[in-house]
Amino acid sequence: CTTPTDRLRRGRATPFDDIECPAPQVTWGSCVFMVAPETPFYWDETCKVGKIGCWADSAHAECRFCSYNGVPCPPDAWHPSRAACDFDNKPAAPFYWEPQCPEVDGGLGCRAD
């Protein structure tokens, strides 16, 4: 797929121009992620090529991962949700996080992990 920005940068058509790109799952500041990262991030105007954590979203130099490798997170950094299943061995059956557990369905299926 290609975005309008991709087409402007390239200045020419490709066979993929008619394929619609999926909507990003996470946008925070000007960072855009197709899949929510497990690492916190923030917008850092001082980021540049070679600086640790920069280019976190693979699209913007200023989008920076933090809370790892000595990069501290500012107070306004995006943090992943801690609401997730945590299995020692991932089951073959499908599963999902139910925010209303244990109130929903009498708790049936809650705390599967």
Image: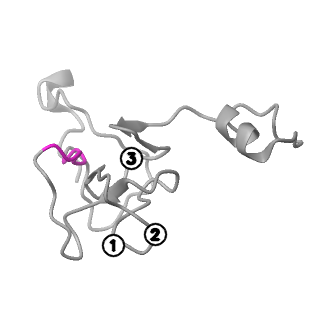
Q: Say what amino acid the circle numbered 2 marks.
A: Val
Q: Residues within 10 Å of mark 1 (few under 14, many from 20)?
A: some
Q: Which of the two discs, 2 and 3, sits closer to the camera? A: 2
The residues tagged by marks 2 and 3 sit, at their Cα atoms, a distance apart of: 23 Å
Return the residue nearer the eye: 38 or 107.
38
Q: Is residue 48 above or below residue 58?
A: below
For disc 1, the marked residue is 52
Q: Is residue 28 magenta?
A: no
Q: Which of the two discs, 1 and 3, sits closer to the camera? A: 1
Q: Say what amino acid the circle numbered 1 marks.
A: Ile
Return the residue nearer the eye: 2 or 92.
2
Q: Say what amino acid the circle numbered 3 marks.
A: Ala
The residues tagged by marks 1 and 2 sit, at their Cα atoms, a distance apart of: 9 Å
* Image quarter (top left, top right, bottom left or bottom right) of the C terminus: bottom left
What is the magenta range?
76-82
For disc 2, the marked residue is 49
Q: What secondary structure prevails in the magenta region?
A: loop
